[in-house]
């Protein structure tokens, strides 16, 4: 009898451990190197570096706003949008209010949303990279 009780207790302990692992992965999805929160933070920081450089150099029009072009607050408030207009089209992302000061770009009314999806925006950025339209050419 003790054997079966011990096995049942061990099985329950393993089930609880596995549930904790599943709960953690659900709350913090990850690949083998980064959590989704880390990937989101990296994306935000890379985007801030890029749009800040574009705005400072006058390379592309970039704007940040608490509202969309129709005047509605982003996601009901607490978020803002950053829109860059590349030669290949608009790209945009939304960020939480606490990240506002990382984006050293003009504040203003963003252009009307052109319907781009994340896949379309990614294609626009890739095409800009492939055609060399992502930076101004400086004399060497």
Image (tube, rainbow, N blue to C red):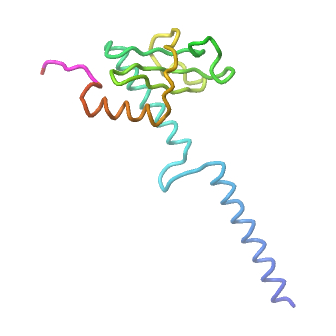
* Magenta highlight range: 135-139
Whether residue 63 is situated above or below residue 5 in the rendered picture = above
Q: x, y percentage for residue 127? A: 31, 32
- Kindly report the secondary structure that dominates the magenta region of the rendered protein: loop
Q: Residue at x 50, y 32 (%)?
A: 117
Q: x, y percentage for residue 114? A: 49, 21
Horizontal side, residue 5 vs residue 103: left or right = right
Work out whether residue 95 or residue 76 is closer to the camera in this orientation and state it. 76
Q: x, y percentage for residue 34? A: 50, 49
Whether residue 16 is situated above or below residue 94 in the rendered picture = below
Q: Residue at x 60, y 26 (%)?
A: 96
Q: Quadrant of the C terminus?
A: top left
Q: Residue at x 58, y 20 (%)?
A: 80
Q: x, y percentage for residue 33? A: 47, 53
Res. 76 image quadrant? top right
Query: How many badges with numbers are in the image?
Result: 0
Horizontal side, residue 70 vs residue 93: left or right = right
Work out whether residue 73 or residue 87 is closer to the camera in this orientation and state it. 87
Whether residue 127 is situated above or below residue 7 in the rendered picture = above
């Amino acid at each position: 009898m003790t054997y079966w009780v011990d096995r049942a207790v061990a099985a329950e302990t393993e089930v609880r451990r596995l549930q904790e692992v599943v709960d953690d992965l659900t709350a913090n999805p990850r690949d083998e190197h980064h959590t989704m929160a880390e990937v989101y933070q990296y994306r935000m920081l890379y985007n801030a570096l890029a749009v800040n450089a574009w705005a400072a150099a006058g390379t592309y029009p970039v704007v940040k706003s608490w509202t969309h072009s129709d005047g509605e607050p982003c996601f009901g408030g607490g978020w803002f949008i950053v829109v860059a207009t590349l030669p290949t089209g608009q790209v945009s992302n939304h960020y939480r209010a606490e990240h506002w000061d990382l984006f050293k770009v003009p504040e203003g009314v963003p252009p009307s949303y052109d319907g781009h999806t994340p896949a379309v925006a990614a294609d626009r950025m890739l095409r800009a990279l492939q055609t060399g339209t992502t930076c101004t050419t400086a004399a060497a």
